[in-house]
Image (cartoon, rainbow, N blue to C red):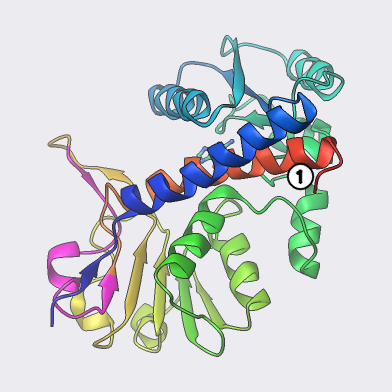
Amino acid sequence: MSAKIIDGVAIAKSVRAGIRDRAQKLQKETGVTPGLAVIIAGDNPASKVYVRNKVRACEDAGINSQTISFPGDVSEEELIAAVGKLNDDPAIHGILVQLPLPPHISVRHVLEAISVEKDVDGFHLYNVGGLVLGDTVFPPCTPYGVQKILEHEGIDVTGKNVTVVGASNIVGKPMALMLMQKEATVAICHAKTRDLTLYTILADILVVAAGHPNLIVPQMIRSGTVVIDVGINRLPDGSLVGDVDFEGVKEKAAAITPVPGGVGPMTVTMLLDNTVSAAERAAGRA
Ligand code: GUN
């Protein structure tokens, strides 16, 4: 059996059309145009590409955006002051601080300075806490994108064994919480997990966000598993691959997301979704 290749680009396109409609409706009915501010510090090339993609996606969705760039030697106080100004700006509904930040800056201090109503990345402690309790918050964009992909493909997670490989604050941990909220049985594996296959072989759905090319090979999964590859790894030859041996695993899985063109386009899409939600809430429409 060869897996269905899940087309993240096509799903993102259809979800973005709905987001554009919501932005237009809000504009027409309240005069409010959703606004996103992105703060970037330093010149990490990957971060610059991500920020450019986010800004371009905003334009296409009818969301105003501004990018505020700081040099790598910016102080924590300056960054927090910039966040404070955006918190007070009624034209800005979402604030995103691109990570990683330069090492002398406390990520937590900067993220906690973001108003919880504008925390469209969902990284503020308040929103993380809301996720634990199953409250309505801004879900972090990458796991939210995975959730949308599963919904779009008609894959119900209720009662399923879902193994999440990778326990990062940005992907693995929030992903596990969101799946638990949907009543999946969740196992979380990480770099210290002794026998990874023990857990991956149990999975009806496997979500991999570990940052290791070829971590998941066909012998590690059952036939018919749904495989969601969140990894993005640049190989020495310049090519982009995920964490899963795509060519091997696709012969055994029921469905699989490719890299690129799987989860990636959905991450930015859900940032747009959260930004429009923030604007709707600010306008008393949600
Ligand atoms: N760096 C890598 N992923 C992300 C993300 O989802 N949000 C932010 N702000 N920075 C990132």
Q: Residue at x 24, y 87 (%)?
A: 223
Q: Position of residue 133 (x, y in %)?
A: 80, 69
Q: Residue at x 47, y 30 (%)?
A: 57
Q: Position of residue 224 (x, y in %)?
A: 27, 85
Amino acid bearing label 1? His
Range covered by the magenta-colored residues: 239-255
The correct choice, above or below, for 111 with respect to 255 in the image is above
- Ligand 1 is in which quadrant of the figure? top right
Which residue is labeled 1 in the image? 124
The correct choice, above or below, for 178 with respect to 25 in the image is below
Q: In which quarter of the view is residue 24 placed?
A: top right
Q: Does the magenta stretch include residue 161?
A: no
Instruction: Locate the N terminus by quadrant.
Output: bottom left
Q: Position of residue 234 (x, y in %)?
A: 25, 40
Secondary structure beneath dot 1 equals loop
The correct choice, above or below, for 200 with respect to 232 in the image is below
Q: Residue at x 40, y 89 (%)?
A: 202
Residue 106 in sight in this render: no
Residue 162 in sight in this render: yes
Closer to the camera in the image, 23 or 100:
23
